[in-house]
Amino acid sequence: KAGVTQTPRYLIKTRGQQVTLSCSPISGHRSVSWYQQTPGQGLQFLFEYFSETQRNKGNFPGRFSGRQFSNSRSEMNVSTLELGDSALYLCASSLGDRNSYEQYFGPGTRLTVT
Amino acid sequence: AQRVTQPEKLLSVFKGAPVELKCNYSYSGSPELFWYVQYSRQRLQLLLRHISRESIKGFTADLNKGETSFHLKKPFAQEEDSAMYYCALHSDSNYQLIWGAGTKLIIKP
């Protein structure tokens, strides 16, 4: 099976702009989780989508949003970018049910905000 | 509250020495625990899970419910073990993985 893919891999944006990141899960996986990874804060959970519905949400401001399509692909959007949003954004897919929650990670999108 | 604590941000040991990465958890139910590893320039990947009681790359981890711990151990560290290690707890109340802050392991030659 193909692994989790994320596009783009690198992105440079300016403060105030918005950005959309994309994640394609492993075929058959219905759950997609998004994380922000920074050296100082480690892995921070953003949100999780399952069957096109947001099922869980972390403690991030409303500038961070996401969605999931019928083919389980997911996008994450950050509006009004701030310097502090510079990070590696990871997505992870899983089957998403109670007995199959092992997560498989993508390579990440490195976002730099200048 | 559900919580995973990795008390060491950085752990540095010499090659050939034993290594133990600590993980403590707080969870009211029956825990399912994992260790994930992220090598330099590679994606985060599952190292092992407690229910399978397996040894991967020489690493083992035993769930100690009395001490609410799931420490990762290896008797003889190798340079290729240098990586970021995360402990995670599965919460069956909301399908999430609860993550520790991570420990950066450096193996000195």
Image: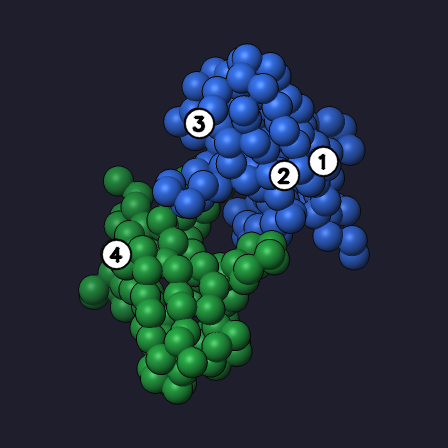
Residue B101 image offset from top left, x and y in percent: 36, 49
Q: Which residue ends up furthest to the left in the rendered image? A: B67
Q: Which-is-in-front pick, marks 2 and 4?
A: 2
| Secondary structure at numbered mark 3 | helix
Mark 2–mark 4 contact, CB under 8 Å?
no
Q: Chain of mark 2?
A: A
Q: Which-is-in-front pick, marks 4 and 1?
A: 1
Colour chain A appears in = blue
Identify the mark nearer the N-term, 2 or 1: 1
Residue A17 image offset from top left, x and y in percent: 60, 15
Q: CA distance from mark 2 to mark 3?
A: 15 Å
Mark 4–mark 1 contact, CB under 8 Å?
no
Q: Which-is-in-front pick, marks 4 and 3?
A: 3
Mark 4–mark 3 contact, CB under 8 Å?
no
Between B20 and A18, the residue placed more toward the observer is: A18
Q: CA distance from mark 1 to mark 3?
A: 19 Å
| Circle count | 4
Which residue type carries mark 3?
Gly
Q: Which residue is mark 1?
A: A8
Q: Which mark is residue A109?
A: 2
Q: Is residue A53 visible?
A: no
Q: Which residue is mark 3?
A: A84
**Left or right of residue B19: residue A93:** right
Task: Mark 3: give few (<14), some (14-19) or many (20+) Cα within 10 Å.
Answer: few
Which residue type carries mark 2?
Thr
Identify the mark nearer the N-term, 1 or 3: 1
Colour chain B appears in = green
